[in-house]
Image (cartoon, rainbow, N blue to C red):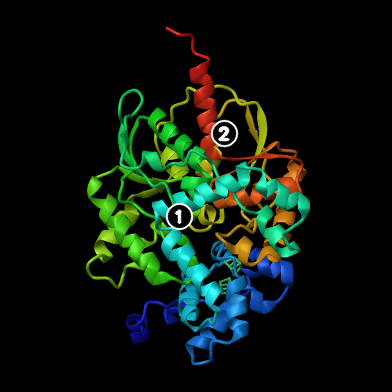
């Protein structure tokens, strides 16, 4: 390991940069390169620019722009025959860039509030969630839309924004829910951050499906946001603080698995070992924590699944979430679970593991690129004739829901676990009362 790798963990490692042999086999797997055909917006071009900076070139506005336009989808990692760890390269490049970016005071304040005050705080999420819920439920949102108050750019962003789901998921924190039938596992569930207010029903469905499969489910009180959005935004130290809190909250619980239903979160949680590798007090604990993290689809596909389900007559297509397929290398598990639902026909779309343009808050920061990618994704979905688009990450669900409205044929969007939950519930509801 080079000495520079030890001095600061938050810049691309020379050893990772040196792995790239500039063959270009990753180019066609890169959504931004396919869209723009610009070498500097390809994985190879971005690695070249990182190497230039590592050898002393300044961090220029153009470098910041090309690294910023990357989705961090890691499609290039899957395509690369040399094993380049592109995901951690781009995250380290962003962490190195972050202190150099000049922002106006209001953008600094907004960013600070979002990452440091909102995401890690259930109290603040509850306050903001309530205000947004009232805005949406009172008809004000509808009025603003109809009267066309928003400028075009904000209208596009607003069309990608989530619906708030009341009641929120917060009352579940600190609770342990018993398995249905005989208990086979003890698991912890991570509720996420925004998911508590935007995907409360998905979180509840996840808990129900786990209980149906013999799991006692704990939702530990002291857990917090996983830090994935912070890592992607170059705020590595903030992510480390959150990682330490989660480790302290969950590691000693002796859980069989620590479960998440968000592929983006799972990818970061499984990389806590790398995030804290330079922290002597937490490096070992972080590795042990990471080894216990499981995506919900990965966990369910690895156990003997409860198959007491009712038929769900539908044609569905599965969109691989980038951080599940490329980040965690999980492709078969969600498909196997879908195929276990009676009556469900799974039809593959073209390029199911090409990013839909969601990528955390990318669709808000780079709305035009996100919409261009979404349009292509929906062309592939429409060609299947599926009535339902299934995926395994809340962020992708939001983006695909917007896609179905804007460019689709009115398809429904669901998480894998929601379809399982529905199949279990219909079966239960149709049982004769004893
Ligand atoms: S990242 Fe991999 S596939 Fe892309 S140019 Fe480098 S070695 Fe080739
Ligand atoms: S992470 Fe995605 S967008 Fe970024 S270079 Fe790789 S393939 Fe392209």
Q: Position of residue 190 (x, y in %)?
A: 39, 47
Is residue 354 in view?
Answer: yes
Residue placed most toward the observer, 32 or 337: 32
- Ligand 2 visible in quadrant: bottom right
From this viewpoint, which residue is outermost toward the top? 434
Among the 4 quarters of the image, the one containing residue 171 = top left
Q: Toward the viewer: 42 or 181?
A: 181
Residues under labels 2 and 1: Cα distance?
Answer: 25 Å
In which quadrant will I find the C terminus? top left
Q: Position of residue 18 (x, y in %)?
A: 48, 80
Left or right, 75 with respect to 185, comes to: right
| Residue at figure coordinates x 34%, y 61% from the top left | 243
Residue at x-position 59% and y-position 51%? 396
Query: Which SS class for mark 2?
Result: helix
Q: Establish if 159 lies above or below 343.
A: below
Residue 328 seen in the current view? no
SS class, disc 1: helix
Tell me which label, 2 or 1, sits earlier in the chain.
1
Query: Mark 2 sits on what residue?
Result: 339
Q: Which residue was labeled with disc 1?
A: 265
Residue 12 falls in image quadrant:
bottom left
Looking at the image, residue 167 sits to the left or right of residue 139; the answer is: left
The image shows residue 315, relative to residue 231, as above or below, that is: above
């Amino acid at each position: 390991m080079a000495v520079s790798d030890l001095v600061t963990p938050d810049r691309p490692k020379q050893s990772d940069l040196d792995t790239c042999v500039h063959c270009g086999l990753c180019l066609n797997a890169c959504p931004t390169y396919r869209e723009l055909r610009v070498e500097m917006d390809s994985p190879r071009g971005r690695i070249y620019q990182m190497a230039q900076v590592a050898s002393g070139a300044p961090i220029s506005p153009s470098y910041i722009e090309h690294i910023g336009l990357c989705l961090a989808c890691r499609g290039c990692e899957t395509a690369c025959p040399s094993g380049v760890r592109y995901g951690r390269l781009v995250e380290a490049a962003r962490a190195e860039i972050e202190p150099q970016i000049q922002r106006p005071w209001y953008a600094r304040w907004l960013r600070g509030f979002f990452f440091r005050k909102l995401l890690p705080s259930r109290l603040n999420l509850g306050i903001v969630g309530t205000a947004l819920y009232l805005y949406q439920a009172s008809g004000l949102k509808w009025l603003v839309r109809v009267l066309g108050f928003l400028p075009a750019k904000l209208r596009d962003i607003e069309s990608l924004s989530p619906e708030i789901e009341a009641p929120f998921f917060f009352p579940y924190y600190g609770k342990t829910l018993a398995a249905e039938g005989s208990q086979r596992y003890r698991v912890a569930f991570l509720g996420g951050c925004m998911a508590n207010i935007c995907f409360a029903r998905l979180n509840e469905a996840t808990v129900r499906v786990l209980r149906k499969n013999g799991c006692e489910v704990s939702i530990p009180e002291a857990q917090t946001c996983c830090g994935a959005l912070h890592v992607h935004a170059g705020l590595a130290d903030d992510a480390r603080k959150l990682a330490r809190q989660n480790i302290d909250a969950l590691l000693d619980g002796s859980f069989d698995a620590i479960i998440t239903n968000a592929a983006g979160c799972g990818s970061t949680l499984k990389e806590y070992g790398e995030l804290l590798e330079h922290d002597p007090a937490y490096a070992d604990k972080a590795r042990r924590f990471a080894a216990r993290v499981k995506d919900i689809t990965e966990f369910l596909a690895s156990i003997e699944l409860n198959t007491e389900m009712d038929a769900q007559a539908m044609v569905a297509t599965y969109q691989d979430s980038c951080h599940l397929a490329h980040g965690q290398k999980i492709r078969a598990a969600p498909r196997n679970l879908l195929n276990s639902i009676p009556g469900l026909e799974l039809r593959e779309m073209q390029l199911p593991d090409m990013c839909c343009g969601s990528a955390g808050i990318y669709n808000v920061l780079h709305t035009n690129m996100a919409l261009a990618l979404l349009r292509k994704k929906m062309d592939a979905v429409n060609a299947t004739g599926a009535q339902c688009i299934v995926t395994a990450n809340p962020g992708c669900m939001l983006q695909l829901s917007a896609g179905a409205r804007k460019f689709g044929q009115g398809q429904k969007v669901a998480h894998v676990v929601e379809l399982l939950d529905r199949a279990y519930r219909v079966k239960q509801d149709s049982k004769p009362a004893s």
